[in-house]
Image: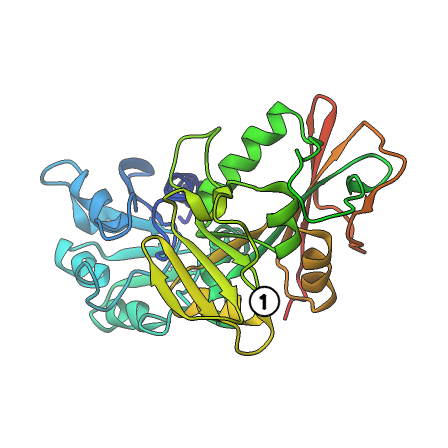
Amino acid sequence: MIQPLFMQRCLQLATLGLGHVAPNPMVGCILVCDNKIIAEGYHQQYGKAHAEVNAIANAPQNFDASKTTLYVNLEPCAHYGKTPPCAQLIINSGIKNVVIATTDPFAAVNGKGIKMLTEVGVNVTTGVLQNEALFLNRRFVTFNTKNRPYVILKWAMTADGFIARNKNSLQYELPDQISNAYAQRLSHLWRMQESAIAVGFKTAMYDNPKLNVRYHQGKNPLRIVIDKQLQIPAAYHILSDNAPTVIFNNQKETTVNNLSYQKIKTQPWYDVLSYLYKNQLQSVIIEGGAATHQWFIDNNLWDEARIVVSNNKMKEGLKAPILLAKANTKLDLKDNKVYTYYNHTTN
């Protein structure tokens, strides 16, 4: 009897790969015999063993494959990439029952793994917790179905709707801290989980951001900035440290150490999305500014928005972007609240 709770365990295991396996999907796998889990595995790191490989490797010696059901939240791969096909491994193991949450939208798989299994008599069931599985791998699904990265908008605003004080020049000054320490640490966890992070020209000039992961353990995302006339001072963080950075501009196309200069060919943000897609970067978190966020909203090119709202008020300043949507979730962080929005009609 198929148990959705077993698939739920696969999804739990899969989440452990967030921030480590992209551009691969997050996958968890368990083996069940006599209604008991006998082995578990998940995809831990890009280029390393897949979830099915780890689960089968963790199974007891001489387990009865004929009585075992394999649960996995994504269709087993059927092609040779950095690892051999998992569908063939399942066949070789002798397992005759496989339960899959959802098919794999990646063109090299997309039904081929299921076909490989059924052609040799493996009983395959699909669609168990399918919506939950698609949501978990929403970055991977968006990348492979819409040919662009998954776009996350993130900003912090006061209770009266301002994201910063008015700035009268492009000279550097200390940014206003709207997010509290808890929200700042959370935002750095978010950065670690995504492939890239991007800001517009004014945000880079006004705030001199580092756009790295300092308050959480993990890798830095690729930094993206729009600087059409190359006006950002060389001493600013985004140009002077060693983190990989891409500067979209109208002046030159070259690479110098960690800095890659890309010429703008169409509209800057379309070029950014195209660049990320071509380089297999599945997600980007947009951290400013207001005009940049509004462009993504107005063009319906956002998938998720995360808005930190402080209890404090500013009374005047730079107004926050306008997002006409209802929040899906709310998180209380002392005097900050974090609202998350999901866009189901995105371009």
Task: Check the image and tell me how it is coloured.
Answer: rainbow
Label 1 element class: helix
Q: Is residue 235 left or right of residue 319?
A: left
Q: Is residue 287 left or right of residue 93?
A: right
Q: Is residue 104 left or right of residue 81?
A: right
Q: Is residue 326 above or below residue 303?
A: above
Quadrant (top left, top right, bottom left, bottom right) of the C terminus: bottom right
* 59 over 117 or under it: above or below: above
> Which residue occupies the foreground of this view, 221 or 240?
240
Q: Percent position (x, y) of residue 318?
A: 80, 46
User: Which of 30 and 263 lies nearest the eye of the viewer?
Assistant: 263
Residue named by callout 1: 269
Residue 61 on image: x %, y %: 10, 37
Q: Find residue 230 and report its horizontal and vertical position in percent.
A: 53, 61
Instruction: Answer with the quarter of the image where residue 117 lies.
Output: bottom left
Q: Residue at x 59, y 49 (%)?
A: 204
Q: In this view of the protein, can residue 117 be seen by the observer? A: yes
Q: Residue at x 85, y 31 (%)?
A: 313
Q: Position of residue 303 (x, y in %)?
A: 61, 58
Q: Could you tell me the amino acid type at mark 1?
A: Trp
Q: Residue furthest left?
A: 62
Asked where in the image residue 6 lies, by quadrant, the reply is top left
